[in-house]
Amino acid sequence: MKGRDQKIFLEALDELEKEKGILKEELLETIETALLAAYKKNYGEKDNVKVTINRNSGDVKVYSQRLIVENVENPEEEISLEDAISVKKRAKLGDILDLEINAESFKRNAIQNAKQIVVQKVRECEKRNIFNKFTEIENSIVSANVRKTDEKGNLYVDINGLEAIVPQKELSPTDKFVQGDRIKIFIGEVEEATKFTKTFVSRKSEELLRGLLELEVPEIYEGIIEIKNIAREAGSRSKVAVYSDDKNLDVKGACIGRNGMRIQTIIDELQGEKIDIVLWNEDVKEFVKNALNPAQVLSVEVVEEGEDNLKVAKVVVAENQLSLAIGKKGQNSRLAARLCGVKIDIHTKSDEVAESDEDELEEGSAFQDTLDERENAEKNSDSFEVEESAFAGLGEDKE
């Protein structure tokens, strides 16, 4: 390298360290290793060769490392003490002496080789830095600035200098953003791929709602209130089952906040998505009743059906509560079933009465059929006895 080129090269490394966060020393060590490999390729494989770059001047030098001995047997790897002292006055037996090799043609090409090495190293370091930064926010909620939406509906966002893409399938149907909007997103699993970092990014995930609740409700963040389960249909409605060991705490009130402020902040972030806070209960019957809110449930019976012993909650509601219990397009009962982990079968009280009447009619009909069968059997039996008696009488007269 020429003096001017060396200076520019070192300054470039300083800038890279500032802008990309890639340590200058790490780059120089990588360059030295690569230049050494290049030298061995062109001038022969020798283990006692060293390439160094001066940290102040940028000057590249190639050295042959020789072991100082009394009697030289291998001139390429050893040097006598006498010859060593002529190079370095304080040399002593057993030391390694660096003898500079005249490799001007190699050093002239070193700057070009170094540039290529730096470019490659920068790419590798950037890739690693991006991966490391994403792993720091893995499985968490972060704020992001919207950059753009492409023709496929994918949302491009910036997370403190990190670029991420929210796929269209991971956006809520109500998510409509413009450049510059500040939004919350969920960062899931981070995986290091061959060319780039693969990251699960979502606004549709139930984990986004869980994270938002942790952010807005201190009692959830501190573990005083536990989120037992979440059933979400993004952009429309969600149900969140919550529980606390503190019997004096108004669990639903804490989640909703004074004048609904806490829950409203989350609703606004989710573009108007409705959120039902449901009290979790160890008793499945009570849990199902709570989950079907706002409908008022009269009774719940839990049975097991099928070979898999699937739990089915048979729910009875008043006639005027049926539509509330089922919800628009079955959403309320569907979310409640997912939240409770059971199948929910909803009937009205009149349906129960009708079924009971049908059962009684069936039982009465079956009873009447039994009586009829018995009566017919008795008639047949009497007829047989008369006929038998008649034949018997005829036999006696004949005698």
Image (spheres, rainbow, N blue to C red):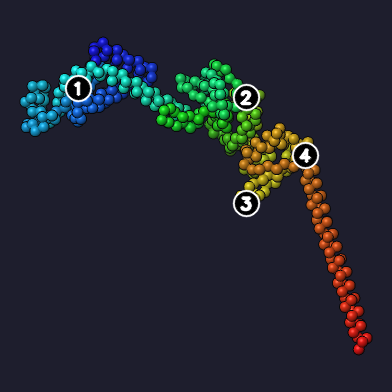
Residue 291, how many percent across, how many down?
A: 66, 37
- Quick one: SS at disc 4? loop
Query: Which residue is disc 2 drawn over?
Result: 174
In the picture, measured across the screen, residue 93 lies left or right of residue 374, that is left
Q: Residues within 10 Å of mark 4 (few under 14, many from 20)?
A: some
Which numbered disc, 2 or 4, marks the residue that appears first in the sequence?
A: 2
Find the distance from the CA under tag 2 to the CA under tag 4.
34 Å
**Residue 178 seen anywhere in this rendered image of the structure:** yes
- The residue pinned by badge 3 equals 307
Which residue is labeled 1 in the image? 62
Q: Residue 371: horizontal and vertical position, in percent?
A: 85, 63
Nearer the camera: disc 2 or disc 4:
2
Identify the amino acid type marked 2.
Thr
User: Which comes sooner in the sequence, label 2 or label 3?
Assistant: 2
Which mark is nearer the camera, 1 or 4?
1
Q: Secondary structure at mark 2?
A: loop
Q: Is residue 1 above or below residue 137?
A: above
Query: What's the residue type where badge 4 is placed?
Result: Ala
Q: Is residue 318 left or right of residue 5?
A: right
Q: Nearer the viewer, mark 1 or mark 3?
A: 1
Residue 147: x, y in percent?
52, 18
Counting residues from the start of the chain, the first of labels 1 and 3 encountered is 1
Which residue was labeled with disc 4? 318
Residue 381 lies in what quarter of the image? bottom right
Q: Quadrant of residue 203?
A: top right
Residue found at the far right of this picture? 397
Q: Label 2 to label 3, Cα distance in Å?
A: 40 Å
